[in-house]
Image (cartoon, rainbow, N blue to C red):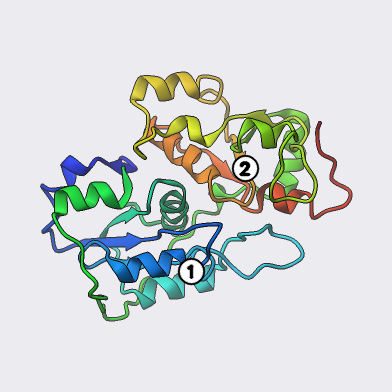
Amino acid sequence: MFPTMRAQELKHIVHTDSIRFIDCRYSLNDASYGKYVYRQGHLPNAVFLDLMEDLSGPVSEHGGRHPLPSKEAWTETLRRIGIQKDDLIIIYDDGFPYAARAWWLFKWAGHERVIVLEGGIQSGITYCGETTTDVPSYPASDYVPAFQDEMIATIEDVRAATVTGGLYDSRTADRYDGSHEPIDRKPGHIPNAVLCPYTEAVTDLGTLQDFHDLRELYANVLDVPNPIFYCGSGVTACVNILALHALGKDDVRLYSGSYSDWISYPENTVHP
């Protein structure tokens, strides 16, 4: 299944019974933002998933700022919100990154029918025609995931890639070269990583670049077997992974702890 949908396609399927909308708006500058705007209005029948509470696990010494939820926790979330195996999951945020993280988690659980709504909630409003403050309630399900652990790169895989290659940094150029680091205590990038900013895959309207632009952007990645993508904490790298899936390349791995996990090990070096 193609990993995204344009808003104009949404109007043709919006009344299909098996559609489940997921709202995962969030702000790194204000952890309460997503819940607040969801209460102010969301697409009809959308449930809310929070980056920290639902799409991440507890922060510890290692694992980065947004570690993956455990398999047990993610399974419980899917059951709590009543997801069924045949549901078509349509995920949106204000733009792209948090929706891409949720998309990746559904794919990790083996759910094939999952897409990101390009253009975020605004495009949904355009074609659904409304928002609501009603919070839907779905009966709990007995969802049984089929986890795809080959989607994850371990820190051992990343250490090997510092020698063999196939490692890509999804952050902005100034964070990659260490000239500007607003979050992590140690600036720079993982040795041998190639810069591939996720922002170049997305337009100002929060849609994917067109096919030809994506092919050009990832020209040096498409023939690399099992490439590994990371970012600061395993969120925005999912945009690159989704974009590569749109090109038919589905052997891409996520270093989920990403740079914030890498620097939590004192023996790991960084460049420059």
| Residue 96: x %, y % from top left | 41, 46
Q: Earlier in the sequence, mark 2 or mark 1?
A: 1
What's under tag 1, amino acid-wise?
A: Ser
Is 9 rendered above or below residue 102? above
Using the image as rendered, state which of residue 172 and residue 260 is in the foreground: 172
Q: Of tags 2 and 1, which is closer to the observer?
A: 1
Residue 98 seen in render: yes
Using the image as rendered, state which of residue 78 and residue 110 is in the foreground: 78
Q: Is residue 151 left or right of residue 138?
A: right
Residue 86 seen in render: no
Is 247 rendered above or below residue 47? above
Q: Name the residue: 33% across, 55% down.
A: 91
The N terminus appears in which quarter of the rendering? top left
Residue, disc 1: 32
Quarter occupied by residue 62: bottom right
Within 10 angstroms of label 2, few (less than 14), some, or many (20 or more) residues?
Answer: many
Give the secondary structure at mark 1: loop
Q: Name the residue: 20% across, 62% down.
A: 131
What's under tag 2, amino acid-wise?
A: Tyr
Q: Name the residue: 66% across, 28% down.
A: 194
| Residue 146: x %, y % from top left | 44, 61
Residue, disc 2: 230
Using the image as rendered, state which of residue 231 and residue 186 is in the foreground: 186
Within 10 angstroms of label 1, few (less than 14), some, or many (20 or more) residues?
Answer: few
The C terminus appears in which quarter of the rendering? top right
| Residue 264: x %, y % from top left | 79, 55
Question: Which numbered tag is attached to residue 229?
Answer: none
| Residue 72: x %, y % from top left | 52, 73
In the rendered structure, are the residues bearing label 2 and label 1 in contact, judged by CB atoms less than 8 Å apart?
Answer: no
Give the secondary structure at mark 2: strand
